Image (cartoon, rainbow, N blue to C red):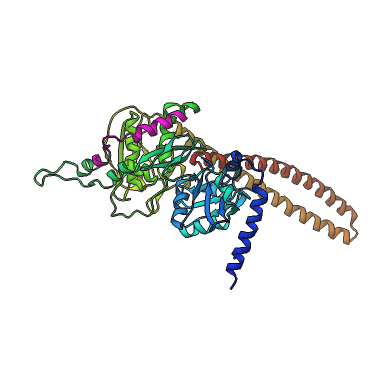
Amino acid sequence: MQHYIKNMNNKILKHFVFCLSLFFLSFLFFSDVEASSLSSRLSGRILLQVESKGEAYYVNPTDLKRYYLGRPDDAFKIMRSFGLGATNVDINNFLKNGARANLSGKILLQVQDKGQAYYVNPLNLRLYYLGRPADAFSVMRQLGLGIKNYDLSLIPVGDLGVVSNSSGSTVKPGEKLVLFSWKYKNKQYSLEQIFSDNLYNSYKNSDKNYYYPANNPPENLREEYYNIFLTQKSGDDSIEKLISGLRSIADKEGFSDDEFVEFVLALVQYLPYDFSKKSTDAQNFPYETLYTGTGICSDTTFLSVLILRKLGYGAAVFDYPDAKHSAAAVLCSGNSSYGSGYCFAETTNYFPIGVFPSSIGTGQAEGSTSSWGSLFSGSNLGQVEILQKTGGKSYSGISNTINKVNSIIKMQENLVEKGNELKSLQNQLNLIKTQLDQILAQAETYKQSNDWTNYNLKVEEYNSKAEEYNSVLANYRLKLDVYNFDVVLFNQTVKDFYQN
């Protein structure tokens, strides 16, 4: 985004000493601690069972139970199970300044990038990159706190097969708890949902091919092929449950119908892009996308279209063969995309409905504010094909988005105008400064020749010119303050528009 800018052969011995020191630390720390408060006091900590073989446990801040880290793969699994989504801006800020206190002991997933994971050390709120399974295992043990067997026994044991979520629901064996984290109107939201392993595998192992008689091909092959992925299996109520959870949040926030559509699509837009997926891999059913919490453009497009249909809105798929990209579209009133009656809705990254990305990187949409006037044009994506069109309710928030963009354009034009005015004043100041230097030089010449009459005249001329300089300078400083204020306002408005 374009913004304006303002003026670690002694390893065994070392390990023994480390564990020994932790042993005494734990003895001093845990004696006289009430069992009922032990879990809460150790929330988010990595515990090392020093009276045994140094087994490591993680105390989950959500349910205050301990989870056995075991092998590197076990540690990595826990990391993914309890990860909390965070944006690039948040992660970068936390890496620089430390995380917020309410994130102590949490595991953060960088949802806008490749899902990189970080552990927030409760001792200093600093982020530690977990990386691969071996890295996650190493970091967790490195930051471990020694604990005696008796004290450890006071902390309830958790099982990844039976995890209690923040809403009190229980995840049973054969189920998976997925945490969705996203932003809307620059406010962070999260929602947990339980998914069935069996239903996921059923979708995953489904035949994802479309068959038709050789002598009777369909009128539009892709139209029929897309129907496969927009059809739910019996017993799949995942979309309905998702909408219900989102509706509960929206009702508390007082969102309008248009805002609710934007709010729901924002959740999909914040799903991490699946960079590991190959172009030859089959598309995902919406259930697969929700279960894995990731996808590529076609996956998130199918999910968005199905959600829109469940909400009662008209929806469609915008296909771009030239760019090898697809996006969702919602039936809209007012200025629709391509005059189609539908408004473009990018699903691989956050964009307001109706706003097109400036480019498609390695499959994921990217934005730019270099030309605000072209935000509603998809010409850079090439020819569009509109498929899976359905009728229903219309989204009318596009006019509000257009007004926001027009306002930003006016703010930008105003900054350019004020910037030019500042340059003109700066040039005027430079000119007067040159004149002052010349008068001063002439006065010095008269002084050296004892021509006090002309010297005094030059002093008067210098003082008069200095008053002019100070007047222009005062005006320049006043306009500079106004310009800098407008720059801050413009940058914040752009930040809010793209939720950066």
Horizontal side of 429 relative to 305 (left or right) equals right
In this orientation, does residue 93 appear? no
Instruction: Farthest residue to the bottom: give it.
Output: 9
Give the image quarter of residue 243.
Answer: top left
Q: Is residue 227 above or below residue 147?
A: above
Q: Nearer the viewer, residue 206 or 453?
A: 206
Instruction: Farthest residue to the front: give it.
Output: 150
Instruction: Farthest residue to the left: give it.
Output: 215
Q: Is residue 220 above or below residue 128?
A: above
Q: Position of residue 408 (x, y in %)?
A: 51, 38
Give the image quarter of residue 198.
Answer: top left
Q: Residue at x 73, y 42 (%)?
A: 474
Q: Is residue 73 above or below residue 409?
A: below
Indicate whether residue 233 is drawn in magenta. yes
Q: Nearer the viewer, residue 158 or 232?
A: 158
Q: Residue at x 80, y 58 (%)?
A: 441
Q: Position of residue 424 (x, y in %)?
A: 63, 46
Number of numbered discs overlaid on the protein picture: 0
Horizontal side of 181 relative to 21 (left or right) equals left
Indicate whether residue 236 is drawn in magenta. yes
Q: Residue at x 69, y 40 (%)?
A: 478
Q: Which residues are magenta?
A: 226-249
In this orientation, does residue 497 appear? yes
Q: Nearer the viewer, residue 126 or 197?
A: 197
Q: Position of residue 223 (x, y in %)?
A: 23, 41
Q: Position of residue 21 (x, y in %)?
A: 65, 58
Q: Main secondary structure of the magenta part?
A: helix
